[in-house]
Image (tube, rainbow, N blue to C red):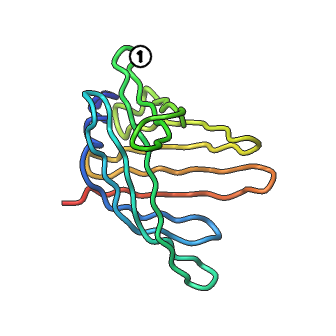
């Protein structure tokens, strides 16, 4: 059985990522979780987005801060700006029974009129998946990212 703190600790390191954005294209790249404090990880990713329509390629970058709150036994994800955590993106809510097998967590973020529902699946110490379902007046797509530890 994994604890939430153990799951958080296994994130540290470098990962390959493959992301599929329904109806739009895919991203291949590298993600890095770097320790910045006792219970903090600075997440940075860089990759290449390949559009479905014409195969155009674009460089992408993104960063967040992941934190583990020992008092509340939870993982939180914050937007990052100038290498500092800013506003909360979401908290991970683990499904208790899943900690016995494949730990699963859900998260929710509202951005104006849009709703981002996330599901994290932690298959083992070297692989996890993040799926976002995005819904809104002008949005209806899924983003699925598979992370594999870079050896």
Q: Assign a secondary structure to mark 1.
A: loop
> Circle 1: is it few (<14), some (14-19), or many (20+) Cα within 10 Å?
few
The residue lying furthest to the right in this view is 137
Image-based side of 135 in relation to 96, left or right:
right
| Quarter of the image that includes the C terminus | bottom left
Which residue does the image show at 24% across and 49% down from the upper left?
Answer: 13
Relative image position of residue 92 (x, y in whole percent): 48, 32
Q: Looking at the image, how many numbered discs can be counted on the residues?
A: 1
Check disc 1 and report the residue beneath it.
72
The residue lying furthest to the top in this view is 71
Foreground pick, 49 / 23: 49
The residue lying furthest to the bottom in this view is 54
Relative image position of residue 100 (x, y in whole percent): 34, 31
Above or below, comparing residue 41 to residue 61 in the picture: above
Foreground pick, 148 / 44: 44
Which residue does the image show at 41% across and 33% down from the upper left?
Answer: 98
Q: Is residue 1 visible?
A: no
Foreground pick, 110 / 2: 110
Image-based side of 123 in relation to 10, left or right:
right
Relative image position of residue 73 (x, y in whole percent): 38, 20
Which residue does the image show at 25% across and 27% down from the upper left?
Answer: 38
| Quarter of the image that includes the N terminus | top left
Query: Toward which corner of the image does residue 65 lie, by quadrant?
Result: top left
Q: Is residue 10 visible?
A: yes
Relative image position of residue 84 (x, y in whole percent): 41, 37
Which residue does the image show at 39% across and 57% down from the upper left?
Answer: 45
Query: Toward which corner of the image does residue 46 lie, by quadrant?
Result: bottom left
Image-based side of 22 in relation to 137, left or right:
left
Above or below, comparing residue 47 to residue 33 in the picture: below
The residue lying furthest to the front in this view is 82
């Amino acid at each position: 059985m994994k604890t939430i703190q153990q799951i958080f600790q296994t994130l540290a390191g470098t990962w390959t990522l493959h992301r599929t954005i329904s109806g739009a294209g895919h991203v291949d790249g590298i993600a890095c979780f770097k320790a910045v404090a006792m219970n903090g990880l600075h997440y940075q990713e860089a990759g290449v987005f390949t559009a479905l329509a014409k195969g155009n390629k674009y460089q992408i970058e993104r960063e967040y801060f992941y934190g583990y709150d020992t008092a509340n036994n939870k993982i939180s994800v914050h937007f990052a700006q100038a290498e500092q955590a800013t506003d909360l993106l979401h908290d991970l809510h683990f499904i208790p029974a899943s900690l016995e097998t494949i730990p699963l967590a859900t998260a929710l973020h509202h951005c104006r009129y849009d709703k981002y529902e996330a599901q994290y699946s932690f298959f083992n110490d070297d692989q996890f998946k993040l799926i976002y379902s995005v819904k809104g007046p002008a949005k209806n797509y899924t983003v699925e990212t598979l992370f594999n530890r870079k050896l």
